[in-house]
Structure formats: C-alpha cells, structure tokens
Amino acid sequence: MSGRAQLMWDEAVTGYDFGPDHPMDPVRLALTWRLVQAFGLDREVEVVAAKPAGESTLRLVHREDYVEAVKAASADPWVADAAYGLGTVDDPAFAGMHEVSALIAGQSVGAAEAVWRGEALHAVNFAGGLHHAMPGGASGFCIYNDASLAIARLLELGAERVAYVDVDVHHGDGVQAAFWEDPRVLTISLHEHPRTLFPQTGWPEETGAESAEGAAVNVALPAGTGDAGWLRAFHAVVPELIADFRPQVLVTQHGADTHFEDPLAHLAVSLDAQRAVQVACHDLAHEYAEGRWVALGGGGYAVVDVVPRSWTHLVGIAAGREIAPESVIPEGWRQEVFARTRQLGPARMTDGRWPVGWAGWEAGYDPADRLDQAVLAARRAVFPLRGLLA
C-alpha cells in the first residue's frame, strides 16, 4: 500500500455556488486550496482530480427520478421542482448544478477507491461532506450525498465494515438514512441537539433499523458546548465503538461549523479542538483500519477565519506533515484573502487554545451535567445493542 496521501482537488468544484447571498460561499474552498499551497502541502500529497460520478454511481444512493430532477434544474433552473428540495431557500437551483455536484461526489468516490485499492493510505476531499442530501431529495445545502456515495462504493468493492464519523455541528442525517438498514456501516454523529438546530434529527434513540440495531449512533450536544465538552464527548463514545466494530475503512466528515465564530449554529468549539479531533480520527484509522482513512469537509460558514485553517490542518495531518498550531500564516495568503473578500485574514493557525484540555470519561461522570447527560444518553441507547457496557 502506498503511504502517500491523496488530495482530491479540481478548481471546478468552486462552481458549487448557490448565489451571492447564500451562506455556503465557494470562496471557502478556493481559500483552503490556496492555504494548502501556501504551506507547501500540495507538494506533500498527490493532488488528483477525479472524474465526476456517473449516473450508475449516483444511483448507488440516489433515486433515478431525483437525479433526473437535478439534471432538469441544472439545465433550466426555472423548472426546479421543490418536491425534490430544489429551488428552495436552502438549495436554490443554478445552471450546471448537476455537473458540479457530480464532480464533488466523484472526488469522494475517487478518494474511497484509492484508499480501498491501496493507491493511497489517506485521501482528503474537503469540498465533500455534503451529508444532508437524501436518496430522493436535496436538503441543507446538499444536492448529492458524496459521503454516502463513497461508502456505497466501498461496499460495492467488497468492504464488509465501514465506519463513518461525522463531527459537523449538524446531524449527519442523509448518511444515517442511506445506511439505516445496513449493519455493514456504523454511522456516528456528534452534533448540536436537534431541539436547537437543523435538521431536528439525531436523537440518541435513533439507533438503526431492526436489521441493523446499534449501527446508528447519535451524540446530541447541548448548545454552548465548548472545547472540553466536545472532546470529552468524542472520546467517551467514538474510540470504544470503533475498537469494537474494527472497520476496514474509516470515513470522517469534518464540518467546521462547530466553531464559536460560525454564524449558523450554537456550539463554541475552537480551531484547536477541531484539529485535535482530526488527529484523533487519523490515529483511530491507524489503530483499527490499517490506516485506511477517507476525510471529507462539510459545513462551515466562517469562510475566511475558520474553514481554510481547519481544513488545511486536516490536509497536513493526512499528509503526515502536521502544521504546528503556532505557525504564522504566509502573508501572501492574507493578501489574497483581502483581495477576494475585503476581509483581514487570520495571522496564525491557532485560536490560542492549544493544547486543549479535557477530562476522560473513565474518571467518572456527573449525572447532573448537561454534557454528561448527552454522552450517557448515547451510550445507553447504543452500547448494550453492541454488547458493550454503557
């Protein structure tokens, strides 16, 4: 197996553009790529532009009638069918929507293929992680569910156990739905509680269909959860489940919208904690999945201050050349930020909270603490189904 990481990148993915007033500004992708280059990480990975996902690949997850509806809206946005979630405030139709959505999906599928076939040990598609798209509809800024498609392709290639860990602030509902009845896929989502955030799913009681009980795991975190609580919850749930499941491939989604600056949600996580979880996912892949790791982007709407730094850290970790948190960001990148956005870019690769401290679950818990209640709810709902002590 090649030890070199792949970075899936095609400049055309920046065409995934819902318009100037939409929170998902594609400048976040362009600025991430430029920051990757500014740190020289593009020379530490194999940069690959995969082909768009074809219709047979898209139908591994999505219904044929939905794909046809996306193609129709892509050719003429005025005919977008809201019954499929297209042409809505969240998912406005735009010309070329099918083509660029299929391109992003193709990068994630290509990443999965490369890792499974041993062409790369790790593969990153930070343009991916569009985890809300459903088999029959668009949702939450997501047209095609590239994460689900990557997992479905792994299963098609012969994988028998794939674990998916989603740390976006929003519940990974589309991926959970795609594999709700499939015990070969373990989906774990840490997200803000559905009482306070879209998509209002991801309750701990959602544990999978009868044929796959315990294959869906949801840790619903109270609004306001910060670094210590977020890391405590991750380490209290994820490693034990991954150790039990022993996936052949680990697929992770790293939405940066858990950050305290993000305008669309209510967690209070720092860049430094996000980096810590990225490192933890990398380590879990090596400990339990022979290093096979597919890492995706996701949400993130602080498009200058947060997203490029978070995902550049992710690329560095996958490449085996971690960027030290205290690193000064190259001035050329900051100048490009100002030229593109008229905003001042951040100066360092940290929020000043590294190293991040947190208390391990094994030391005990407080049943009156809201964060510990969330962890307990997840463990009690799923662990016994998997033969583990809650």
Image (cartoon, rainbow, N blue to C red):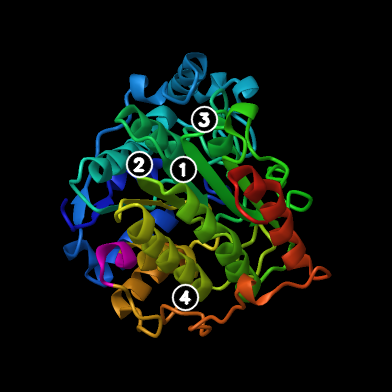
Helix, strand or loop under label 1: loop
In the rendered structure, find residue 17 and report the number of the disc placed on it.
1
Helix, strand or loop under label 4: loop
In the rendered structure, find residue 319 and report the number of the disc placed on it.
none
Name which of mark 2 and mark 3 comes first in the sequence: 2
Is the residue 22 above or below the residue 134 in the image? below
Is residue 194 one of those drawn in magenta? no
Picture quarter with the C terminus? bottom right
In the rendered structure, find residue 344 and report the number of the disc placed on it.
4
Specify the principal SS of the magenta part. helix
Res. 300 visible in picture: no
Separation of disc 1 and disc 2 at Cα? 19 Å
Q: Which residue is mark 2?
A: 108
Separation of disc 3 and disc 4 at Cα? 47 Å
Q: Amino acid at mark 1?
A: Asp
Q: 243 left or right of 208? A: left
Q: Which residue is mark 3?
A: 182
Q: Are marks 1 and 3 in contact (CB under 8 Å)?
A: no
Between marks 1 and 2 in the image, the one whose residue lies nearer the viewer: 2
Separation of disc 4 and disc 1 at Cα? 23 Å
Q: Percent x, y for residue 226?
A: 65, 72
Question: Bounds of the magenta span?
Answer: 316-321
